[in-house]
Image (cartoon, rainbow, N blue to C red):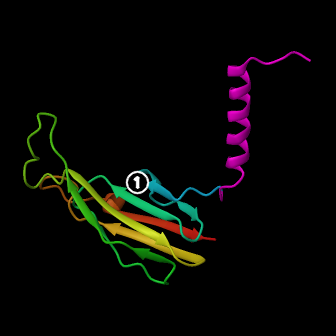
Amino acid sequence: MPRLTRPATALVCAAAVAILLSGCSSGAPTSRTVGVSSNGTTVSLERGQRLRVTLSSTYWQFGAIAGGVLAASGQRTTPSTTQSGSTCVPGQGCGTATETFTAIRSGRARITASRTSCGEAMACVGSAGSYELIVVVH
């Protein structure tokens, strides 16, 4: 059997420790982020896991969450800046609406958000003003 050099032995030992430690984690990430592209889908969470929903306009307003499966931390609206560094023109809605939820017990919940404006002086048409995400907590 060939002998390993000291650096090679250290590398093999470090890899073995990393493999052993990875087996100690629960496997579920502590948080998950979804956005507009997740509209109409279902996501699964483990109890204690956090879910961050970020929607691409400050016009979005999150609805009430019923059932006691998720606890909301409170909506945040973050205005963005234009590429030149100046703030957005009032009325554009640029920025994000973000809500973070914590899965507190097993069950199903429905996260909704809505908006009436889809841009400066533009009313939303059809489903462009509604967002729905089903969350299943295990």
Which residue is pictured at 49% across the width and 56% down the height? Answer: 32
Q: What's the amino acid at mark 1?
A: Gly
Instruction: Give the position of the N terminus as an image quadrant.
Output: top right
Which residue is pictured at 55% across the width and 61% down the height? Answer: 43
Q: Which region shows up in magenta?
A: 1-26
Instruction: Give the position of the C terminus as an image quadrant.
Output: bottom right
Q: Is residue 114 left or right of residue 110?
A: left
Q: Where 105 sits versus 129, above or below? A: below
Decide whether the magenta segment is chiefly helix, strand or loop. helix
Image x and y of residue 40, in percent: 48, 61
Which residue is tagged 1? Answer: 35
Which residue is pictured at 67% across the width and 41% down the height? Answer: 18
Disc 1 is placed on an element classified as: loop
Q: Is residue 6 left or right of residue 122?
A: right
Q: Is residue 59 left or right of residue 87?
A: right
- Residue extending farthest to the bottom is 67
- How packed mark 1 is, by other alpha carbons closer than 10 Å (few <14, some 14-19, many 20 or more), is some
Q: Quadrant of residue 82?
A: top left
Q: Nearer the viewer, residue 20 or 82?
A: 20
Image x and y of residue 95, in percent: 22, 51
Q: Nearer the viewer, residue 47 or 44?
A: 47
Image x and y of residue 62, in percent: 32, 70
> Does residue 16 show up magenta in the picture?
yes
Q: Is residue 119 left or right of residue 114?
A: left
Q: Nearer the viewer, residue 81 or 27?
A: 27
Image x and y of residue 5, in percent: 74, 17
> How many discs mark residues in the rendered view?
1
Which residue is pictured at 44% across the width and 58% down the height? Answer: 39
